[in-house]
Image (cartoon, grey):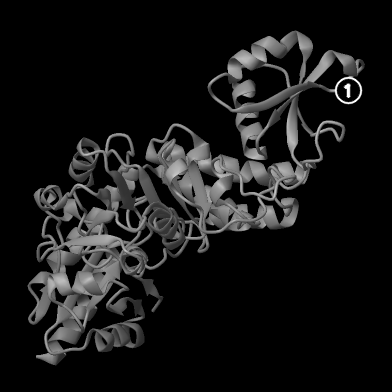
Amino acid sequence: MSIIYFDNAATSWPKPPEVHAAMQKYLKKIGANPGRSGHRLSVEAARIIFDTREKLVQLFNVDDPLQIVMTKNATEALNIAILGLLKPGDHVITSSMEHNSAMRPLRAMEHRGVNLTVITCDQDGLIDPVKVSAAIQENTKAIFVTHASNVTGTVMPVADIGRIARKHALVFCVDAAQTAGCCPIDVKEMNIDLLAFTGHKSLFGPSGTGGLYIREGLEKRIEPLCVGGTGSRSESEEQPDFMPDRYEAGTPNTVGIAGLQAGVDFVLSEGVDQINSREEELVKTFMEGIKGLAGVTLYGQTDTHKRTPVVSFNIAGMDPAAVALELDERFKIMARSGIHCAPSAHKTIGTYPQGTVRFSFSYFNTQEQIAKAIDAIRKISRRKK
Amino acid sequence: MKDKKSYDVILFKAVSYALKAEKILKKENLPHKLIPVPKHISSDCGICLMVHLDMKDQVLTALQDKVDIENVRPLTE
């Protein structure tokens, strides 16, 4: 019995073979520090990073590759956005479905005098844009919202919220950790000013990669969190004020970014729409397969079109951790249980503090694996009865 | 490169800007070469684009409004 990996919302695995090859190629043949020297290997390394930005802008419909800041993950990107933008006295709006990657920096800023409104989402985890509009005050500076919940897979109406943000001239920041690569993202159409994404989930890069898109000009309002060497303006002891160097101090994760580039290439060549529809089929089969089982509760929207390939469920009378352990030990199915770093989301859907069992699929999962998983859950739930 | 005097170098804020310019010039088929910034110009450790004087205007037009240029200097001292 081979391992079935259903924890892709934590990090995707396996990665396309091209990702391994690109990382090996960098380590074996390039190796140099990008943008720090004028020799060909250094330029080659810098090219890897530039080309990665170029592919990302293609994916998100951004005009200028230099508006993409490379970070180590979505958390770092959100920290730059939140800590760099907000000042004491500002008001900011977010949703109750946020991951701690956004919620903790927002709470930290609350302690520093930022006024935070958390919009309570419905039981399926969906935010009501009308409530967002109603929460806007005179000193509201920004709206931070996740594109999709990592707990329920609920895709938020970001285009609607983007219109509201634009109308009120607010900064609109979207956390695309769960959606970049598996849901269409168009920063222009959605009026997104800041897009935080991770490289190691649906973009199929290795961990340690991610980024932040910053709308042109907005960098003037966002302080960097980390300053230091950039390879540019070396004669100056002050941090450069231009993109993306302003936010990219220190030697970057070039080997990781080389892998990310291959991952993004994979996504672009397969097509987000195709990835999205194949994953939706997996979710549909899975939800159909377990919804009738005795004691099984499914969370989130029933319309699979409005969710990412993330499905949270519980089996009555069973601790989610025990279910996950049994799935692993008896069936070699890798799932995640608990709170998934999103306590507020679990409070919203009524699963706090026990949490849920979460299955998260990727483009590489198969219908056969789904069938095995349904069978496994049937066995566990039956025994429990 | 026979006559160094016939060349200028275009300087950028950072390597990524030079690479962005390089891509544009490649697309437009305008001859250019990425070289380390000559020492007499800057102690910075970056790269710059070398272009023939005959091509300079065309190159600068191609890059206008697309890439921030720091400076344009003769290749030789």
Front residue of B28/A314: it is B28
Count of numbered circles in the view: 1
Q: Position of residue A51 (x, y in %)?
A: 57, 40
Query: Does A28 sit left or right of A356 as displayed?
Result: right
**Quarter assignment of residue A382:** bottom left
Q: Residue A11 location in percent, x, y?
A: 42, 66
Query: Where residue A200 sits: x, y (%)?
Result: 46, 60
Residue furthest out toward the top: B54
**Which element carries disc 1, helix, strand or loop?**
loop
Q: Quadrant of residue B31?
A: top right
Local packing at callout 1 (Cα closer than 10 Å; few below 14, some 14-19, many 20+) is some
Q: Residue at x 53, y 38 (%)?
A: A66
What amino acid type should be assigned to the residue bearing mark 1?
A: Thr
Q: Say whether residue A262 is visible.
A: no
The residue sitting at the right extreme is B2
Q: Classify A262 as above or below A385.
A: above
A140 left or right of A202? left
Residue A140 falls left or right of residue A251 = left
State the image coordinates of residue A345 (x, y, percent, origin top left): 21, 69
Residue position for label 1 = B76
Pointer 1 chain = B
The quadrant in which the N terminus of chain A is found is bottom left
Q: Is residue A165 visible?
A: yes
Residue at 30% x, 66% y: name it.
A110
**Quadrant (top left, top right, bottom left, bottom right) of the C terminus of chain A:** bottom left
**Does A52 appear above or below A308?**
above
